Amino acid sequence: MKITFPHMGNAYIGAKSIIEDCGIDVIVPPKCSKKTLELGTKYSPETICLPLKINIGNYIESIKKGADTIIIAGCKGPCRFGLYSIIEEEILRDLGYDVKFLVIDAFENGDDGLLNQFGKLNAKQKFNILISFIKGKKIMTMADKLTALSNRKRAYTNDKREIDKIMDDYRDQIYHSKGSDKIMEIIKKTNKRLLNIKEDNTKNILEIGIVGEIYAVIEPFVNLEIERKLGYLDVLVHRYLSPSAWIENHVSIKTLFGSSLEKKMLKEASKYFKTIVGGHCRETVGSSIMYAKKKYDGIIQIYPFGCMPEIVAASVLPSISKEYNIPIMTLIVDEMSGEAGYITRIEAFVDLLRKRKEQVNNGKIVSRS
């Protein structure tokens, strides 16, 4: 068995760790690229979500490297993501690829499908998988914290390209490593390298919260490396959505009692939504309110073209912007998104926030950390 999975931010780091520690071969898809998108777009329904198209590209590239099994998360509710595994399996089968899909559903609504599968294993297998999962969860958290640290350093340092160099080297090492112990070692060494980068605390730093559909928010290729681009504009980026947060909210034991962070988001959003909408609609609205209350300078919503839950969220954000007096910009991405126009919109939004901050402070720039 050779397992692969779709790229989704730092998720591949934890998944690679867990699977390799279980003694199973892993085929990590090549980094998402224009080629990946072209492959997926060619063989996917024209009007389907952008994430599915990139998933298909990931799978084809991995299958050509020997992968025969695909692991993907599942979900319930009014979002097309719940049908991804079915649609993707049909597409690959039509292309002549004989691969097996393993769907990991969240521990929600009494669903014990994964627990039933877990129960079929012997004691030794259960123990090994449990230890691997615990290590993988820790690695996912470490990787997300490292990304957050790199975003801070990029915003505050004058040598921004050095941050990019460190992070690119880190990802290259992760790709060629094997097992959780080695991955943890790489993350710790990279963390030390970043901490050694000198910060310039005299900079006029803006703080922007990123919200939206989870895949578009955390996969750099899809959002055109927005965190790096904002860092180059002296913007400190924050997002509540991450692979480790998803694990905490949907797969960990805490899910049985409710994640405090997710509960807070849903509570904030309850003014606008009394029921499930699908995707991360309520989280988008709730986290936007949380950023506004924390006095962030602005918010950027990102979602794939045609994403129904985020379209619903986008209809609410103007009310939040007006009520809390915070600028909010929405970016919609698809396979036709052009980087030049994307950068222009981001730069214009940041310029607006800086001018607004000067006016709020009566012309005197005040830096917050």
Image: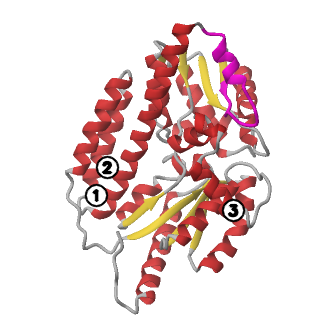
Tell me where residue 324 appears, x and y as whole percent. Answer: 60, 77
- Disc 2 to disc 1: CB gap under 8 Å: yes
Q: Quadrant of residue 3?
A: top right
Q: Nearer the viewer, residue 97 or 159?
A: 159
Q: Nearer the viewer, residue 163 or 23?
A: 23
Q: Which mark is residue 160?
A: 1
Q: Quadrant of residue 138?
A: top left
Tell me where residue 7 appears, x and y as whole percent. Answer: 53, 36
Mark 3: which secondary structure? helix
**Circle 1 residues within 10 Å: few <14, some 14–19, many ≥20:** many
Asked if residue 130 lies in the magenta stretch, the reply is no
Q: Which residues are magenta?
A: 103-121
Residue tagged by mark 2? 164
Mark 1: which secondary structure? helix
For this view, does 335 lie left or right of residue 25?
right
Q: Earlier in the sequence, mark 1 or mark 3?
A: 1
Task: Give the amino acid type for the residue marked by disc 1 in the picture.
Answer: Lys
Between the C-alphas of marks 3 and 2, the distance is 36 Å
Identify the image quadrant of the C terminus. bottom left
Between the C-alphas of marks 2 and 1, the distance is 7 Å
Residue tagged by mark 3? 269
- The answer to whether residue 289 of the structure is visible from this angle is yes
Mark whose residue sits in front, 1 or 3: 3
